Image (cartoon, rainbow, N blue to C red):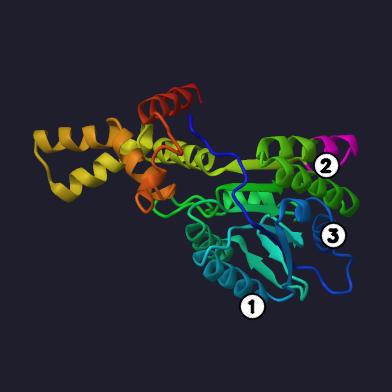
Amino acid sequence: MTGQTTHLHANCLVVLNCMNEEEVAPGLRLAHDLRAGVAREAGMTVRTVDCARPVELRMALAELAEAAADGLMPAVHIDGHGAVEGLLTGDGSLVLWEALWPLFRNLNVATRNNLILTFASCSSAHGIVDKTAADLSRPTPFLVMVAPQKIVLNGTVDAGFEDFYRTLIATGDINAAFDLLERRDLAASTVGEYKLLIAPKLFVLSAGKYIQQHCIGEAARARERNLEALRAGDRHTRRHVRNAIRGSQALYLREKYDRFMMIDRYPDQTGRFQINFGALEARIRRRARRT
């Protein structure tokens, strides 16, 4: 895989504070410190929005999408308690990840696939990856996502993300910023274990699941039987069905990738993200045979 863009394309950092007003909100401290320091020097605005209720969170994301269509390019940091199932808002409500993805997706489309999402929510990375973030028939909900895989501690998460954003704003280098976040986490001996995920990698993970679940082994044989029954086919039809299911999926992956990465929507981004789909499929099939 080549041509991955891992640099900041944002003119504003938006902190969505989903904490209860009686709790310490690390995200507000993060916004204050960045606003007074590196963000001001870089000419980047820093905004905070209180989202103690699900309706406020939905409204904030919808308004950001409208603003992005008019030229705002936000990086979004979500501060709140989290779980594998979803995000907890200050009023105690659980907002399922599945309910948030359409909102993130709309925002990312408006930013032309430049959205950076960071979460200070415990265990959110597993939920984000597992709860249908990658729908290969729809655009990716983010370009870059950073989230903790386990429990994070307040003192560590705010210091870690301050290091992350200070480096990101100053250099534009997401990988360098993430390295600092990980080092801060390791030095504190916490169990945060942050995950960095970029959209092309999310596509590869999901494409691998698709091929393993639908095009290999018993799953492929089951699909063949179902299609043959539907078509009541002769030998030629059965051979066509087998080839369609077991044969190369590279063209299918190319079409899905163009939609997922919004290349079909924004053709000028064709050279931005490049994958060798034949090599990708071969690697997936080799891995499946070993398992």
Specify few, some or many for label 3: CA neighbours under 10 Å numbering under 14, 14-19, or 20 or more: many
Q: Position of residue 40 (x, y in %)?
A: 77, 56
Residue 181 in which image quadrant: top right
Q: How many marks?
A: 3
Q: Is residue 186 magenta?
A: yes
Residue placed under numbered mark 2 in the picture: 191
Above or below 269: residue 67: below
Q: CA distance from mark 1 to mark 2?
A: 31 Å
Question: What is the number of the mark on residue 55?
Answer: 1
Quadrant in the rendering for residue 39: bottom right
Task: Give the residue type that dot 1 points to.
Answer: Val
Instruction: Residue at 43% x, 34% y: name it.
Output: 274
Percent of width and height locating residue 241: 20, 38
Q: Position of residue 275 (x, y in %)?
A: 42, 32
For the point 11% across and 42% down, the residue is: 233
Question: Which residue is nearer to you in this view: 268 or 49?
Answer: 268
Residues shaded magenta = 183-192
Q: Do residues under tags 1 and 2 come within 8 Å of each other at their CB atoms?
A: no
Answer with left or right where residue 258 lies relative to residue 85: left
Residue kind at label 2, given as amino acid type = Val
Q: Quadrant of residue 211?
A: top left
SS label for mark 3:
helix
Marks 1 and 3, Cα distance to the nearest angstrom? Answer: 22 Å
Q: Nearer the viewer, mark 1 or mark 2?
A: 1
Q: In the image shown, does 257 or 85 lie closer to the viewer?
A: 257
Mark 1 burial class by Cα count in 10 Å: few <14, some 14-19, many 20+: few
> Does residue 151 appear left or right of residue 117 in this picture?
right
Pointer 1 or 3: first along the chain? 3
Kindly identify the residue that appears in the image at 82 percent across and 57 percent down: 30
Q: Which residue is mark 3?
A: 26
Tag in front: 3 or 2: 3
